[in-house]
């Protein structure tokens, strides 16, 4: 898949650091490809033919994203369709070539040590979908070179779905940290309908999300406030009542319906539910639904003050169907997580329609448990 050939043609189709020997009719050709693609705009090829001044053609693929759209076909297009100004250099000098069926060609008598370099500018682009893709109407997707970007909760103040972007805003490239320190992040100003404020919206390559805990993520960002508001799950639409085995008299079991995005698990600026002072005692929180729903996901944001109220030892979910409580069929790759400072999300491993949800929480022996917020998402 990296290279293909005929008797006298070599096709370079994918770009990654590789080396290979291609058997042509007039002799073998050794190719060494050096690049950090898709993080670098330069792809270099060192050509070493077996025969001196061996004649053959080298064909290099010019990716679709370097043109007027991210991928082939009619589904998506760039808002600004000005192509990237890519270049092909032979032994350091630019050569004039035109793409044919996605490839540019250099045909010559090659000598050992000839160098070909592709320069593929990786511009940040806004992408639109055709109107037939109803879910993407009034939304944009951000790409950089061959990479799709997304917004993840861990990097942003507000919920990712609450942001509204303006394609005319300036975009900056920054480096990640920790395990993602070699990855280019994108930052841009955007306002959130959640708190009606302007923030620095941070995005990372889609392939790299979910490396810092299970969290909310979005690829197609809203272009207007009404769409962003509609994108945020409204838990009050689904729940008619909440019952808990115990609620501390200074807390409120309905606080978890605020459906906001807490600053952290010790956010004391918002109300909460806790089972204080019942340390080590199992708690049950039951959500009574207004109507049966096809459940997409359930998320819980734990309260933890580092003392008497801490994230639980474990928890599990049950769902109510035809008046009977059943074990929640958690998706095979999901876990009941006890992570701080974020929502802990689970999905059903099969299609379920439920009349209610029940959260069973096992505290640590020396602590009570608490919840700042929960989210319920329905299959649309």
Image (tube, grey):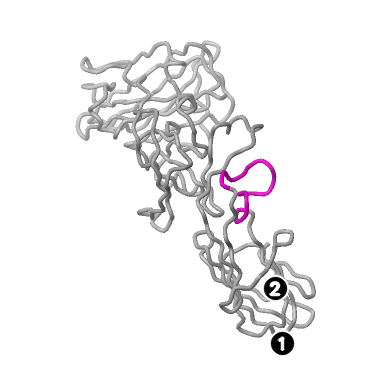
Residue nearest the viewer, comparing 97 with 71: 97
Image coordinates for residue 52, horizontal then vertical, percent = 70, 89
User: What label sits on residue 202 in the rendered view?
Assistant: none
State left or right for residue 126 relative to residue 369: right
Name the mark nearer the viewer: 2 or 1.
2
Q: Is residue 40 magenta?
A: no
Q: Is residue 77 magenta?
A: yes
Q: Secondary structure at mark 1?
A: loop
Image point (58%, 28%), residue name: 350
Q: Which residue is mark 2?
A: 106
Image point (36%, 13%), residue name: 243
State left or right for residue 205 relative to residue 51: left
Image point (62%, 44%), residue name: 77
Task: Specify the segment rendered in magenta.
Answer: 65-80
Look at the image and tell me in which quarter the C terminus lies: top right
Tell me which corner region of the image, top left, top right, bottom left or bottom right, holds residue 181. bottom left
Q: Which residue is mark 1?
A: 51
The single residue placed furthest to the bottom in the displayed view is 52
Q: CA distance from mark 2 to mark 1?
A: 18 Å
Image coordinates for residue 155, horizontal then vertical, percent = 37, 43
């Amino acid at each position: 898949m990296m290279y293909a050939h005929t008797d006298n043609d070599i096709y370079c189709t994918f770009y990654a650091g590789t080396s290979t020997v291609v058997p042509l009719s007039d002799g073998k050709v050794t190719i060494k490809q050096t690049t950090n693609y898709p993080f670098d705009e330069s792809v270099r090829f060192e050509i070493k033919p077996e025969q001196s001044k061996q004649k053959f053609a080298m064909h290099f693929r010019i990716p679709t994203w370097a043109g007027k759209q991210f991928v082939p076909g009619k589904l998506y297009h760039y808002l600004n369709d000005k192509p990237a100004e890519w270049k092909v250099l032979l032994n350091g000098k630019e050569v004039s070539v035109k793409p044919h069926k996605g490839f540019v060609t250099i045909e010559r008598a090659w000598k050992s040590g000839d160098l070909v370099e592709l320069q593929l500018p990786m511009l940040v682009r806004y992408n639109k979908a055709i109107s037939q893709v109803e879910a993407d109407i009034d939304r944009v997707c951000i790409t950089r070179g061959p990479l799709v970007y997304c917004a993840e909760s861990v990097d942003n103040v507000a919920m990712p779905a609450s942001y509204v972007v303006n394609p005319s805003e300036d975009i900056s490239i920054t480096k990640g940290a920790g395990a993602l320190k070699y990855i280019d992040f994108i930052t841009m100003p955007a306002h959130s309908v959640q708190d009606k404020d302007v923030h620095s919206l941070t995005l990372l390559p889609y392939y790299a999300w979910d490396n810092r805990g299970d969290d909310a993520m979005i690829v197609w960002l809203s272009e207007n406030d009404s769409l962003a508001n509609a994108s945020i799950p409204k838990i009050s639409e689904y729940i008619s009542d909440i019952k808990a085995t115990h609620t501390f008299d200074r807390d409120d079991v309905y606080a978890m319906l605020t459906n906001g995005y807490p600053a952290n698990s010790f956010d004391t600026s918002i109300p909460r539910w806790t089972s204080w002072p019942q340390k080590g005692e199992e708690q049950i929180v039951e959500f009574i639904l207004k109507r049966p729903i096809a459940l997409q996901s359930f998320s819980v944001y734990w309260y933890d003050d580092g003392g008497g109220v801490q994230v639980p030892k474990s928890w599990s979910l049950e769902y109510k169907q035809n008046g009977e409580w059943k074990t929640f069929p958690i998706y095979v790759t999901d876990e009941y997580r006890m992570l701080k400072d974020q929502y802990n999300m689970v999905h059903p491993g099969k299609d379920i329609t439920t009349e209610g949800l029940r959260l069973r929480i096992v505290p640590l022996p020396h602590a009570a448990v608490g919840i700042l917020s929960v989210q319920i998402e329905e299959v649309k």
